[in-house]
Image (tube, rainbow, N blue to C red):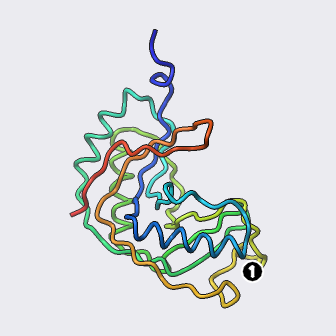
Amino acid sequence: MPDPAELKPARLFLALWPDTSVRERLAGEGGRLHILLGGRLTRPETIHLTLVFIGNLARERLPALLDRLALIDAKAFRVVFDRADCWRHNRIAFLSPSAPPAELLDLVGKLEAALAELAIAFDRRPYKAHVTLLRKAECPMANPARGRVSDSPEWGDFKPIMWSAERFVLVESVSTPQGVRYDVLGSYALL
């Protein structure tokens, strides 16, 4: 009898995964925001920058996806997370770059094109680079038109975090009794 886990579709996303020093800085900012906004902290080992959310994909399609991702030709880049923010509509507190680098947007475009080429469905919302640090945050109502509050003096000292992106990864989100676990299925160098 086949393993039931092998029959379930894989829940996937493409992401940048931070190195240890960047992860520690991001987790530290999460702790600072947690003091101000409450909510539930993102576990340090799961901190990432989503590039494209794919969702469920039949496992038999994984080899073709892994092979196609290996052909992505994109440049390495640096992204500076210099803005703390909070979306009231979904109560997410996060860091984002005020000026996402062109190489980041180019990478997202190439990944979306590769998925479309393979006829793999993905989340087609406009891309907003952000690293989620809190869920269920108490986002203040500073600007009702935008539904978020930007970094400001009452949030304390914030020093921008520079992240050198040298690889992207394909990740499976796996639900376990202890919570969600992220398994890296493929890792691909940026040039």
| Residue placed most toward the observer, 94 or 67 | 94
User: Which residue is at the far top?
Assistant: 1
Q: Quadrant of residue 30?
A: bottom right
**From the viewer's perspective, is 174 left or right of 167?**
right
- The quadrant holding residue 38 is bottom right
Q: Position of residue 139 (x, y in %)?
A: 74, 71
Q: Position of residue 127 (x, y in %)?
A: 49, 63
Q: Is residue 85 above or below residue 190?
A: below
As drawn, 123 above or below 21: above
Q: Residue furthest bottom?
A: 153
Q: Is residue 87 left or right of residue 24?
A: right
What is the quadrant of the C terminus in the image? bottom left
* Tag 1: amino acid: Asn
In the shown orientation, is residue 77 left or right of residue 126? Answer: left
Q: Residue at x 78, y 76 (%)?
A: 141
User: Which residue is located at x 39 percent, y 59 percent?
Assistant: 108
> Where is residue 180 shown, x and y percent of the image?
57, 44
Please state which of residues 164 and 56 is positioned toward the viewer in this rendering. 164
The picture places residue 145, in percent across and down from the top left corner, at: 74, 76
Task: Please give the name of the residue rendered at 34% of the width and 61% of the height, measured from the top-left corner.
Answer: 107
Q: Nearer the viewer, residue 137 or 44?
A: 44
Question: Which residue lies under the disc numbered 1?
Answer: 143
* Neighbour tally class for label 1: few under 14, some 14-19, many 20 plus, Cα within 10 Å: few
Label 1's element?
A: loop
- Against 155, residue 50 (above or below) is above
Is 102 rendered above or below residue 185? Answer: below
The count of marks equals: 1
Q: Nearer the viewer, residue 42 or 111?
A: 42
